[in-house]
Image (cartoon, grey):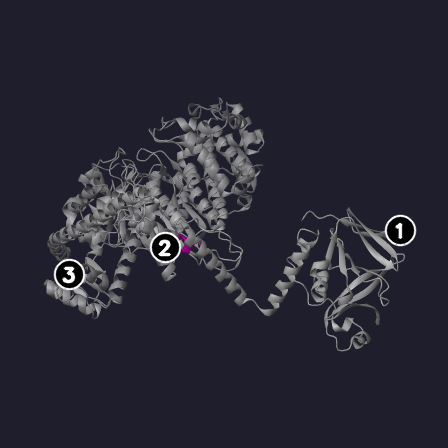
Amino acid sequence: VLFRGEALGSEGVRVMMESALTARDRVGVQDFVLLENHTSEAAFIENLRKRFKENLIYTYIGSVLVSVNPYKELEIYTKQHMERYRGVNFYEVSPHIYAVSDNAYRSMRTERRDQCILISGESGAGKTEASKKILQYYAVTCPASEQVQTVKDRLLQSNPVLEAFGNAKTLRNDNSSRFGKYMDIQFDFRGAPVGGHILNYLLEKSRVVHQNHGERNFHIFYQLIEGGEEDLLRRLGLERNTQQYQYLVKGNCPKVSSINDRNDWKAVRKALSVIGFNDDEVEELLNIIASVLHLGNVQFGAEESGNAYITTDTQIKYLARLLGVEGSILKEALTHKKIIAKGEELMSPLNSEQAASARDALSKAVYGRTFTWLVNKINLSLAYKDDLYPLSKNASVIGLLDIYGFEVFQQNSFEQFCINYCNEKLQQLFIELTLKSEQEEYESEGITWEPVQFFNNKIICDLVEEKFKGIISILDEECLRPGDASDLTFLEKLENTVGGHAHFVTHKLADGKTRKVMGREEFRLLHYAGEVNYNVNGFLDKNNDLLFRNLKEIMCQSENKILTQCFDREELTDKKRPETTATQFKNSLAKLMEILMSKEPSYIRCIKPNDAKQAGRFDEVLIRHQVKYLGLMENLRVRRAGFAYRRRYEVFLQRYKSLCPDTWPNWKGRLADGVSTLVKHLGYKPEEYKLGRSKIFIRFPKTLFATEDALEVRNCAVHKEAILIQAWWRGILALREAKRRRTAADTIRRFIKGFIYRKQPRCPENEYFLDYVRYSFLMNLWRNLPKTVLDKSWPTPPPALTEASEQLRNLCMQNMVWTYCKRISPERKHQLEQKLVASEIFKDKKDNYPQSVPKLFASTRLNGEEISPKVLQALGNEKMKYAVSVTKYDRKGYRARPRQLLLTASCAVIVEDSKLKQRIDYSALKGISVSSLSDGLFVLHVPCEDNKQKGDVVLQSDHVIETLTKVAICADKINNVNISQGSIKFTVGRGKEGVIDFTPGSELLVTKAKNGHLSVTAPRLNSR
């Protein structure tokens, strides 16, 4: 049930692989290594069938993942599933492609060694989907940033582009990859994907010009015609009808129910934009695609002499415009062949059949080279750019190999020969690396390595690739030799050269029984996966893949910027014959093997359950065929040659410790000793297991199954006991709940009754309610007490607590005042006292008072250096309390004079430089007048009878509020400060008066008016 839940995505739990062994009769085992009869192909397929029936499409062979295409959507690829497999031990959760992906990622991060994931299987088995799932997993689970997100998007969007140009509908698969692909994903030191690189192998160019019945050309042609905008099709000279194009009608399959070409077109256009194609590049790329369709519609007629001529001039006009070449030159190049003999160029006319072949060769060359350019363009956009360390090679790599599996058809040709040769190389690599990793694990654990017997397919690889004597060398030799070389002469040469090889047979060399199933134009290779007959027809032409010189020349002259990159002019001057297709493939395969050997491999083997692409259908014959061709039984045999099961001590002990009294509930000693104690208690025989340095190795699955069954029996017994304990505990919990509810009901009842009697005197009916109300008020008050003296908030008390609330409020305020006063410094206290006096005098009376409130009063505005020593000497012992610079206005003329106002304990002194101009004793000071505006003028009134005084003093201070507050405090004249609204009268001399008129204005202005008054204009502030 746990496995079913995990496979269907309905449970989010982790399950140890061993936990499913108890359900093995129904869902099979998760690892084929645990099959008791591991040599039986029938048992292998039956296990696959059980799991497929339960929607469990993934199974392990050790660390190899076997995947069966379900042909339906399963809810096992959600973000939650990705998180479940992220950072988890490989065997801790059920088999999944995310487990393989995460294991490769963690190995790359922890071991700092590059990884690769090899995905193989025949067409329709789900290889392309598997590579997409791996890319999506890394896109979601790896660290991200804005730059990294761009790379992730480009990695993901490279898929629809490559599928459009490299995939096609075949009889076996509606989205079959017709090329091999190896992609490197590059990660930085944080584990974030920062770049990528793609290598492509053996694009099936022949599909451009020919498709078998029921198959289609590459997707991009149909997407362009079905999804392209009307204006675009008009520019390209195309019609929205695939039946109009010869290259699209040969398979007689324009529509496929599972493919929506219009939607796919939108996805491709978006992907091209994300990858970084600009509008000009997209237009030139589509021009090339359209030109291939027009080339297919070029038709030839034959003159009386047999020479070919073109009957469809309209197509030539379109081609000339789309390819950016001269129409007349293209016309000649399609009907003539350029021959260079003894340094002289000759134009040899072609017959109609040769012209058609030249046309098709040009179509294949243009499309094939454009595909290579497209891959290179994608690589440029994915290139790793390290801004911090541009020369560093710090990126770690995970490679994805999505390549064709072993192919066996009714008619097998050159393509199948290359594909199966590739699979031979991969199988050779796989066996070597599997045995190597097994041997390394045994040696690291200190267990003796037992040599494993296996079929070494190097003999077949050598048969194909050996220099001078291999099939590829013989094929190249036949292609290059002068004379009438043909496919049949190639076959004869094979018989003469490798006829005695144990893995090579032809009709001529075979016995009577074999001849009945072989054609005279066929040879048979005995591959690791079985026998395959290859028909030699077309081998030489496909291997040569020649394009006439004059066709190359005209492509080099193209104005299409993509084609100028695809067709290098150096090809025309290079006298060296280009490598054949088979040699190119052999060399690229050798490089691929080097790449894979340098990395730590993981394997995914994909299986197609039926040819009808139906969900739930399990074709045993077809699957047996694939199990054989994927070499899965050989893989299992190698993996089972030693020990079927191995686990780290801590994992094994944690799972099975309950089966031994000595290890339950916890083992205190060394893990190895704990496992040794446990297996002895379980009765393991010495030949059934070995203890390594950190792991236990169990040879037979039946030993593990017996242990798992014993654990299940114990778990059942424990389960029954657990049920009794649970029942007892649930009873206690139920009693507690009933008591809690009963108490709650009583409380509610008392509250209701108390509310009804709340206005009555205290009595048994309302005492609980009243107490709660008081308690609630006091708790609310405690939580919401005022924080400062200025905070006047106070919770509203219930009627019964009004008097108590008021007393508490007074106490609280007194406490806050006391606390505040206790914390205040003497300087601060003095400052506040002065501010209080200023408030009493000026608040709401003078305009510039509010501006003075936040500013602290200075102790003095003049320091000792600014006051003349003579003045200080004249003051004698009188201590100066405050000094400020002022402006004095003369009594006559009102001329402004700079002065200093000094305040002592007994008098105010007006000083001019070093002279004491006027001394005003506080006892003689009658009062102080100041306006209500924002000016700084004020008048000190003195008695006119006093002979020492010349009259009232008119002064102006920049700190008028501060200055007058200081004067009022020092002279004790707080109540004698007069704030006038319109004008101030002052005594000029004996019997004479002066007037200061105050008027609001835009700026401060002090002048003598025509009427003889002193006029003061001051800004009116709106702060009062």
- Residue at 84 percent across and 58 percent down: it is 987
The Cα atoms of the two marked residues, 3 and 1, are separated by 115 Å
Residue type at tag 3 = Ser
Q: Which residues are magenta?
A: 779-785
In this figure, which residue is indicated by the disc labeled 1? 1012
Location of the N terminus (image quadrant): top left
The Cα atoms of the two marked residues, 3 and 2, are separated by 34 Å
* Residue 708 in the figure: left or right of residue 523: left
Q: Main secondary structure of the magenta part?
A: helix
Residue type at tag 2 = Tyr
In the rendered structure, find residue 105 and report the number of the disc placed on it: 2
Residue type at tag 1 = Gly
- Residue 960, position as x, y percentages in the image: 73, 59
In the rendered structure, find residue 658 and report the number of the disc placed on it: 3
Label 3 packing within 10 angstroms: few (<14), some (14-19), many (20+): some
One can see residue 526 in this view = yes
The Cα atoms of the two marked residues, 1 and 2, are separated by 97 Å
Q: Is residue 47 magenta?
A: no
Q: Nearer the viewer, residue 118 or 106?
A: 106
- Residue 53, position as x, y percentages in the image: 20, 40
Of callouts 3 and 2, which one flags the residue occurring earlier in the amino acid sequence? 2
- Residue 177, position as x, y percentages in the image: 37, 40
Q: Secondary structure at mark 2?
A: helix
Q: Are marks 1 and 2 in contact (CB under 8 Å)?
A: no
- Residue at 17 percent across and 62 percent down: it is 657
One can see residue 598 in this view = no
Of callouts 1 and 2, which one flags the residue occurring earlier in the amino acid sequence? 2
